[in-house]
Image (spheres, rainbow, N blue to C red):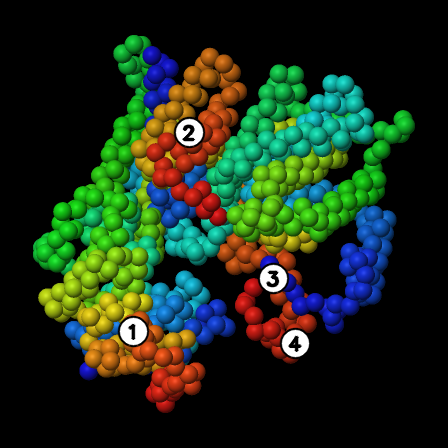
Amino acid sequence: MQLAVNIVVLASIYALIACGYVLIYRVSRVLNLAHGELMMLGAYMVLATASLFNGHPVIALAAAILLSLLVGVLVYVFLMRKMTGEMVLAAILTTVALGILIRGLVVLIWSAQQQYPAQALGVPNPSLVLFGGARVSMWSAVLVGTTVIVYAALFAFLRFGRWGMRMRAAGQNPLLAAQRGINLHGVYALAWSLSTLTGALAGILMALDSGVTGGMPVIGLKAFPAALVGGLDSLVGALAGSLIIAAAEVLLIYYVDPLLSDVVPFLVLIAMLIVRPWGLFGTREELDRV
Amino acid sequence: MSLLQVEKIEVVYKRVITAVQGVTLSVGAKQIVAILGTNGAGKTTTLRAISGFLGLDDARITEGAISFAGRRIDNAPPHDITARGVVLVPERDKVFPNLTVAENLAVPVSRAGAAERRRQDEQIYQLFPRLAELRQRVGGLLSGGERQMLAIAGALMCRPRLLLVDELSLGLAPVVVQDLTRRLLAVRDELGIAILLVEQSAAAALTIADHAYVMENGRIVLDGDRERLKSHQDVQEFYLGQASGERRSYRAVKQYRRSRRWYG
Amino acid sequence: MFRPVPRASGYFRTGYGQDLALVQTRAERIGLAIFVVILAGFPFVASAFALDLACQVFLASVGALSLMLLTGYAGQISLGHAGLIAAGAFTTGILAREIHAPFWITLPASAVTGSVLGFVFGLPSLRLRGLYLAVSTLALHFVVIYLGGEYETKRGFSTGILVEPPSLAGFKLSGGRFWYFVLLAAAALSLLICINLLRSRSGRAFRAVHARETVAEALGISIAGTKLLAFVISSAMTSVAGCLFAYYRGFVSVEAFDLFLSIQYVAMIIIGGMGSLLGALLGAAFVTLFPYAIEALLHLLPNADKLAGDIFAVNYASFGVVMILFLVFEPLGLVGIWHRLQNYFLLWPFKYRPLAGARK
């Protein structure tokens, strides 16, 4: 039972991170390899806002989340906008470079030690007991719930919301979208800000649960195979991929070898690339986007 | 006072290739104007220059001016031009393949409010009844004619005052083309929208155009109203496929190209 | 790619020998001779620190050249370069440690490991391109690192494997000057191999596959064979670099071969300039010397002590900034800047090249 709970928690983490990759890829065909670092930035910002809004944890959290939205927009406007229309490889490497930059800045500003936003905010993290004797920490449970809410909201927005439809349109045929009056820069900025928002939520909730260090982006990188396995432009795929990879990881760690934890997502990824490169639910494109 | 005035424009690709030179044309309000010519004549480039989508191919309008409703729009950003009321129905990739017909019509941006948009929707479905039956069909699964209808309908959702149509008849059966041209006429008559049509099929274009221009090698060589063009010998031979009998000498063929020389 | 105006006043080669020669004009020959003299004399006038820097640049050049061959010329994106270097280093370390193999066994063994691994890394390229290929190489890199980590923990080398310096006939070969010449020879040899490979049929096949696969196939070039060949040759070279790395550092540990190392190599070929061997060399020099330059710059700043403690983070941040600057403003890299400079002086007082051709 504990195993099942672990799988669900890990899958939620991966899913919440993976939807960020999917959002940006679906709308602008760019792979944002700085997502893990942006997620970490969100977690560190809680530390900053915690000291700013001392004694008001809710405000501090809300402020950190809003700041992350802003960061997403800024990253697009000042950096990625210049890369629209360039080779896709160049855009991806720009995100990689951005990630490296953020990693350095984070250590310079906040130091490399492990820090605990939960303590800074003064919020507790009790361990809840579920049926079957399994235990889960409160913030992990909140994370699972958040993932469900976020996915539901994203589904509704993309399917029924007018700007969600426009985002999908821009992803399918950017030129035609521009000819129909859609401001592509605006749509891309929206995608980036939503992606950074979901990433920051993931980062903040993970940090509240187990603290934040400079090593957090590794989880972001492990969630990327989840997005790819499900199909880089499919939200449903991200959910499915996260479940598969989380299950594989937890089970293999438990029954085979704990050292496998970092490499399991990539083994699943390799298997999927051999069998079905465009993922479980992705659109079958030309596969040569560079 | 014409709605669209193109004044001696020159379009240059990659700074070295002149695709269009000295082109002057105008479209009056509620007029249907056609640009005819073979491949490579520069028709699509002219249309792209007007709609502002030259930047993708590394091209620029280097001379001349384009004004719409009195304001200059040459080299303006594309969504500006769309907002002013000049909307393009492109030649390729004209619909969103993974969105349904209803979603395709909901996506275009216009300043209309919700009630206004619903009214527009109704109007479109009246003009194109076939689309009303296909509301939930995904764009990529439509037939060629239906797709062209959807493309035009999508452009109309932007509330244009001038519609630019690029190669309407490409890849479509003649019966379908006839149907579409009749609907374009209805668009002009009921919605009061001017239309600039770029067409390889002169026969189809000349059934609905009030005025037409013939382009060759980036220049305009002939223009006139429908009757004049239909009865012009060269147009009949080269564009309408009605050969006049014996072969003509080289000098005679050059005649109509020269006749435009002093019009620029 | 962007080529400078040829310097000679025309092509007057009258024989195949002349055509194949690496240096054409007399000016080029004199230039090369001076360059060789400088390179040969450098270790006798430079400090130990400068010598170490030069060695690192040469070592990086081998990896950069191989990656340029793979990505710049054959067009196969690889983000798993560090994994290949690790493979070479670990082969050397394992063989040296387990069976005390001498260097004239470990070096070829590394090349063989590299070739086999290159074949494996290259298999996805038969089906995937672009982004998906890059991702597959990334995944394979993690698998290699995992295997290295497994070996380290299972055999008790949790802090890494110590590698003894290579010995020949009982003499231990080490010392700054010795390594300078060895690594210089390795870099020069790699450069020569690359130049000749690119001028050969295989090299032309690489470029053809990169440009348009369908056309290349129509011309009778085996796409699968060419891609795999590119991967195998490039990986063999990279693994040899890994072997040299193991001996030079004397120490092999899985932490040294992280993703950042892969990114550094990719940065080398991008900052240097894609599609140019000179670019690989310039990029290798730039990226290798960059941290030291930053450190030197740091000491000039007023509050140096505070930042000096986080030198690693400063490196990261400034590396990210520089990479972004190159990607956004100078996609043709250092070679692009160099060619622009050359053209400016060669064409002066004219501004544009004489032929009214397309910009490229």
Mark 1 chain: B
Q: Are marks 3 and 2 in contact (CB under 8 Å)?
A: no
Q: Which residue is mark 3?
A: C2
Which residue corresponds to mark 2? A211
Q: Which residue is mark 4?
A: C348
Distance between the alpha carbons at the discs numbered 1 and 4:
58 Å
Q: Looking at the rendered structure, which numbered label has been put on residue C315?
A: none
Residue lying at 43% horizontally and 82% vertically, measured from the top left? B250
Q: Residue B242 — which label?
A: 1
The reply, left or right, for residue B120 in relation to residue C223 is left
Q: Chain of mark 4?
A: C
Between C127 and A165, the one lying in front of the other is C127
Q: Is residue B21 above or below residue C317?
A: below
Q: Is residue C260 above or below residue C105?
A: below
Asked if both marks, 3 and 2, belong to the same chain, the answer given is: no
Q: Residues within 10 Å of mark 3 (few under 14, many from 20)?
A: few
Check the picture and name the quadrant holding the C terminus of chain B: bottom left
